[in-house]
Image (cartoon, grey):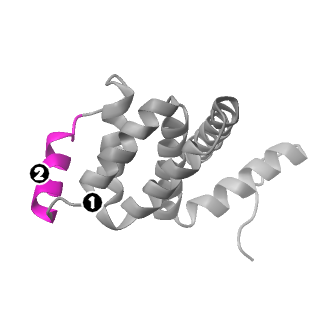
Amino acid sequence: MLAESGSSCSTACSARKSLARNLLLRNNHTVIDIYTKYFGLCMLYSLSHYTLLSFKRGIERMAMISPHEWDDRLWQMRNVNEEYPLEARIERTLLETGLEALEAWAGAVEVGLGMEDQARTDIALAYGKAGRFLKQACLL
């Protein structure tokens, strides 16, 4: 058995939520990784086409910096939170995911650049909803 719903569930809906939560909590590290990715994609795809082009150039430059400089910049960004501008939050997300994951983020930017504005906005909303669900389900 992978997981079971709570004994206090009185409806099928509450049983499904309990089951999903129990499954997700079995590997909290994976859930945090997925949430971070969805949060980043939500932010990224909410940007305008021209801002995405700017991020593409930024990611290309980030790929060239040394690991020491990477760590220094991450330390400088450690206090960035929801109150900061979107660009700073995305930079922190990129830094947190690491240099190895930068290529995947570059691919996500390319995908975003290939979309019409409304389609990109719709996808940003979907990633945002999925991330909020994970956060709420796992009480992150």
Residue 66, position as x, y percentages in the image = 14, 63
- The picture places residue 74, in percent across and down from the top left corner, at 20, 48
Q: Secondary structure at mark 1?
A: loop
Say whether residue 36 is left or right of residue 127: left
Position of residue 55 measured from the top left corner of the image (x, y, whole percent): 37, 41
Residue 59, position in %: x, y? 33, 51
Disc 2: which residue: 72
Left or right: residue 95 compared with residue 140: left
In percent of the image, x 65 and y 59: which residue is there? 22
Please indicate, yes or no, whether residue 20 appears anywhere in the rendered image: yes
Q: At 47% from the left edge and 54% from the top edge, which residue is drawn? A: 32
Give the residue drawn at x 16%, y 47%: 73
Q: Which mark is residue 63?
A: 1
Which image quarter: residue 52?
Answer: top left
Between 42 and 14, the one lying in front of the other is 42
Query: Magenta residues, as a range?
Result: 67-79
Q: Separation of disc 2 and disc 1 at Cα?
A: 15 Å
Q: Residue at x 47, y 44 (%)?
A: 40
Above or below for 97 versus 131: below
Query: Is residue 16 shown left or right of residue 128?
Result: right
Question: Crowdedness of circle 2 by 10 Å Cα count: few (<14), some, many (20+)?
Answer: few
Is residue 121 magenta-colored?
Answer: no
Viewer-proximal residue, 54 or 97? 54
The amino acid beneath tag 2 is Asp
Q: On the image, which quarter does residue 45 sit in?
A: top right
Quadrant in which the N terminus is drawn: bottom right
Q: Nearer the viewer, mark 2 or mark 1?
A: 1
